[in-house]
Image: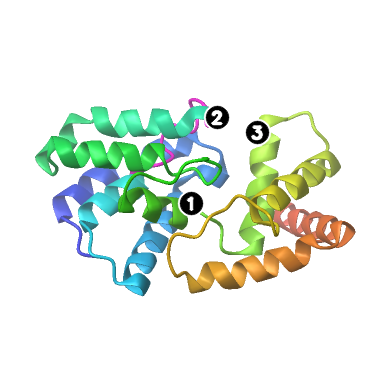
Amino acid sequence: MKINEELKQYIEKNIFPIYDKNEKGHGIEHILYVIARSFELIQENNIDVNEDMVYTIAAFHDIGHHIDSKNHEVISAQIMYDDKNLLKFFSEEQLLVMKEAIEDHRASSKSEPRSIYGKIVSSADRNNTVQDCLRRTYTYGKKLSPEATDEELFLRAYDVLNNKFGENGYAKFYFKDTKYENFLKEIRELLKEKDNYLNTQRNYIAELKKTRKI
């Protein structure tokens, strides 16, 4: 990455700490993952874009998740757009493109992102390991329904992942993405047998609890 160092320092100091307010599935670990994946996609597909914009979009894309998870893309976009410190690094036109990219990043959106920047962050925001899917669906489900039993959360997670990554799932491809293609084969194989899926998640979550990673 060739990111403006002053911009990078501003985001690391002032934006990243806010992610402590989010649940772990949308915390700073996830943000760093999306930043890294964004630049992997740029490299794999030889995309010519403003890297400072890509970095900032990825850094802000879930910042409003703790405020309202169901509308977090709109809230996160507005937080970024209202940050006057960013005027030092970007034009108003660039900020508008970045705002739209954050608004468009959800995989469940029925419309394609309006720009290449939206397509990058939307693609980078997808899971690409089965373990991450098992952990994030559990922790997010727990946040939504804190009184639910683990078995209820596992059943919810199966439906969520099937709808997203199953043969007719809504997750979309915008670029060549070798990691995602391999992941998709693996998660679809796991989802074929519901009991096997449930047992896999049950054991994985038990291990995470044992090691206090959730």
Mark 2 crowd level (few <14, some 14–19, many ≥20, 10 Å Cα): few
The answer to whether residue 213 is visible is: no
- Left or right: residue 150 versus residue 119 is right
| Position of 96 relative to 191 (above/below) | above
Residue 30 — which label? 1
Looking at the image, how many numbered discs can be counted on the residues? 3
Q: CA distance from mark 3 to mark 2?
A: 12 Å
**Quadrant that contains the N terminus:** bottom left
Q: Position of residue 97 (x, y in %)?
A: 25, 41
The secondary element bearing badge 3 is classed as: helix
The answer to whether residue 125 is visible is: yes
Q: Are marks 3 and 2 in contact (CB under 8 Å)?
A: no
The secondary element bearing badge 2 is classed as: helix
First in sequence, mark 3 or 2: give its number.
Answer: 2
Q: Amino acid at mark 3?
A: Lys
x 49%, y 28%: residue: 71
Residue 45 part of the magenta segment: no
Residue 170 — which label? none
Q: Position of residue 79 (x, y in %)?
A: 32, 29
Residue 70 — which label? 2
Q: CA distance from mark 3 to mark 1?
A: 16 Å
Magenta residues span 60-70
Q: Amino acid at mark 2?
A: Lys
Q: Position of residue 61 (x, y in %)?
A: 39, 42
First in sequence, mark 3 or 1: give its number.
Answer: 1
- Left or right: residue 135 versus residue 64 is right
Quickly name the residue at label 3.
143
Q: Nearer the viewer, mark 3 or mark 2?
A: 2
x 35%, y 71%: residue: 45
Mark 3 crowd level (few <14, some 14–19, many ≥20, 10 Å Cα): few
Q: Position of residue 85 (x, y in %)?
A: 16, 34
